[in-house]
Image (cartoon, rainbow, N blue to C red):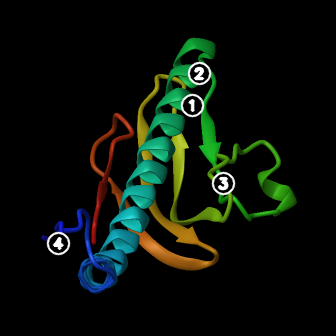
């Protein structure tokens, strides 16, 4: 009497690998898009936190602060502050942001850029320097 072999045949393993490859092919592009979106949100929250830190500094020192674009090298804005972001990310001010000595914000519209391409548009929501996404 012949004894039954234990384990899987080569054909069964190839079928399972083919099914797994198809699943990964469908999931991977969506995963990459989700990762890009999560990174954009992280950059947004980091930008928001740093603007809030500037607001607290302005209030504590009782001196107003203005924000300049991350790639704005205008010498007239030498006293203005820039906010560092993650590698590959910059921002562009579409409206200037001024923080008064009392900590209130005035103006403020921002574009977050990834490698020079606009990813997110932000607008000032209130005088407490909170931003909201426009898109």
Name the residue furthest left. 1
Q: Is residue 19 left or right of residue 64?
A: left
Q: Is residue 72 left or right of residue 24?
A: right
Seen at 70% across and 43% down, the residue is: 81
Seen at 36% across and 76% down, the residue is: 28
**How far is the residue under mark 1 from the one under mark 4?**
80 Å
**How far is the residue under mark 4 from the one under mark 2?**
83 Å
On residue 102, which mark appears?
Answer: none
Q: Look at the numbered discs 1 and 2 and tell me whether their residues touch, using CB distance below 8 Å.
A: yes
**How far is the residue under mark 1 from the one under mark 2?**
5 Å
Residue 13 quadrant: bottom left
Q: x, y percentage for residue 10?
A: 33, 82
Q: Look at the numbered discs 1 and 3 and tell me whether their residues touch, using CB distance below 8 Å.
A: no
The answer to whether 5 is drawn above or below residue 59 in the figure is: below
Please report whichever mark, 1 or 4, sits nearer to the chain's N-terminal start. Answer: 4
Q: Nearer the viewer, mark 3 or mark 4?
A: 4
Element under disc 1: helix
Q: Nearer the viewer, mark 4 or mark 2?
A: 4
Label 4 CA crowd tier, 10 Å (few <14, some 14–19, many 20+): few
Q: Look at the numbered discs 1 and 4 and tell me whether their residues touch, using CB distance below 8 Å.
A: no
Choose between 17 and 9: the one closer to the eye.
Answer: 9
Query: What residue would you read off at disc 2?
Result: 57
Element under disc 4: loop
Query: What residue would you read off at disc 3?
Result: 68
The answer to whether 41 is drawn above or below residue 12 in the figure is: above
Q: x, y percentage for residue 82?
A: 69, 48
Query: What residue would you read off at disc 1?
Result: 54
Element under disc 2: helix
């Amino acid at each position: 009497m012949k004894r039954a072999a234990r384990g899987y045949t080569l054909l069964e393993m190839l079928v399972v690998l083919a099914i797994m490859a198809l699943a990964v092919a469908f999931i991977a592009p969506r995963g990459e898009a989700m990762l890009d979106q999560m990174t954009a949100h992280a950059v947004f929250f980091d930008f928001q936190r740093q603007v809030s830190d500037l607001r607290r500094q302005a209030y504590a020192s009782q001196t107003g602060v203005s924000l300049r674009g991350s790639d704005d090298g205008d010498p007239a804005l030498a006293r203005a502050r820039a906010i560092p972001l993650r590698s590959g990310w910059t921002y562009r001010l579409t409206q200037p942001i001024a923080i008064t000595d009392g900590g209130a914000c005035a103006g403020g519209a921002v574009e977050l850029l990834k490698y020079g391409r606009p990813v997110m548009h932000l607008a000032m929501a209130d005088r407490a320097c909170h931003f909201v996404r426009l898109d």
